[in-house]
Amino acid sequence: MRKLTASALLALSSLVLVTGCSSNDQDSGYQVENKTPEALYADARAAMELGNFTKATQVLEALDSRYPFGPHKTQVQLDLIFAYYKLEDSANALANIDRFIRLNPTHKDIDYVYYMRGLTNMQADQYLFHELMGIDRSDRDPTAAIEAFRDFEQLVKAYPNSRYSPDAQQRMRFLKNRLGNYELQVAEYYVYMDTWIAAANRAQLILEKYSDTPATERALEIMVQAYDKLGQQTLRDHAKQVLATNYPNNKLAQ
């Protein structure tokens, strides 16, 4: 079993403390006062500035419910998206994002909302404990990563001049690498099981969808191995040629 470093243990204990504080806030039984929409919104903003996003969501939800046509209705919805994202409550964040897009498709900040959808799905894909411990879990369910990639792609295509597009493009590259690694893990499993047709097909998928990711070299190796096992010499030689062209120092390309 891998030993935890002192810094990792410290970070882990800090995380537990933070989680505990968050739970205490959630169970505090805070009652939203009966105030004007302006006063309630001021309370919500103050809570957000202090980092108390649990209280902020409670006040914002009350404000949204009590004054659905109030002076801050649109900003309340935007703040709810951000607050739930900060709480890592992806279900509520996505619900508010989708509602906002449905009700305000031409809003001036709609590019921000698509960006937040990508961030929320990307957050849902991450496993903090695995990253903290340096554990590679590229084999985990990629559903949220796929959704995040689509969200960022939609943002970049629909709003290329958005201030959020450059960061979205960087995140798309990261997500593409992550998805390429996932497909590679599946291909490796088929290799392990001696299921060579499935291994070759999965490796081919990597070349078709993720050819610009680090998974490509190993995918070509698997194709060479798989076609060799299957007695498909023409396909093997073609895969080997592609491997040699792109990775001349690879030992299978010799």
Image (tube, helix red, strand yellow):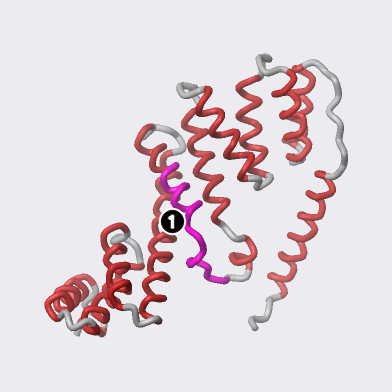
Q: Position of residue 40 (x, y in %)?
A: 78, 23
Q: Secondary structure at mark 1?
A: helix
How many numbered marks does the figure carry?
A: 1
Q: Quadrant of the N terminus?
A: bottom right
Viewer-closest of 221 and 230: 230
Which residue sits at x=37%, y=72%?
Answer: 187
Which residue sits at x=62%, y=27%?
Answer: 77
| Amino acid of disc 1 | Phe
Image position of 44 (left or right of 168): right
Q: Position of residue 168 (x, y in %)?
A: 44, 44
Q: Position of residue 121 (x, y in %)?
A: 53, 47
Please determine whether, in this image, residue 190 is positioned above or below residue 24: below
Image position of 57 (left or right of 27): left
Q: Please identify the quarter of the rendering in which residue 179 is found.
A: bottom left
Which residue sits at x=76%, y=55%?
Answer: 19
Which residue sits at x=47%, y=57%?
Answer: 142
Q: Position of residue 250 (x, y in %)?
A: 26, 80
| The magenta stretch spans residue 145 | yes
Residue placed under numbered mark 1 in the picture: 174
Please determine whether, in this image, residue 205 is positioned above or below residue 198: above
Image position of 177 (left or right of 61): left
Image position of 37 (left or right of 120): right
| The magenta stretch spans residue 175 | no
Q: Quadrant of the C terminus?
A: bottom left
Question: Magenta segment range?
Answer: 135-151
Viewer-closest of 145 and 214: 145
Q: Please identify the quarter of the rendering in which residue 155 is found.
A: top left
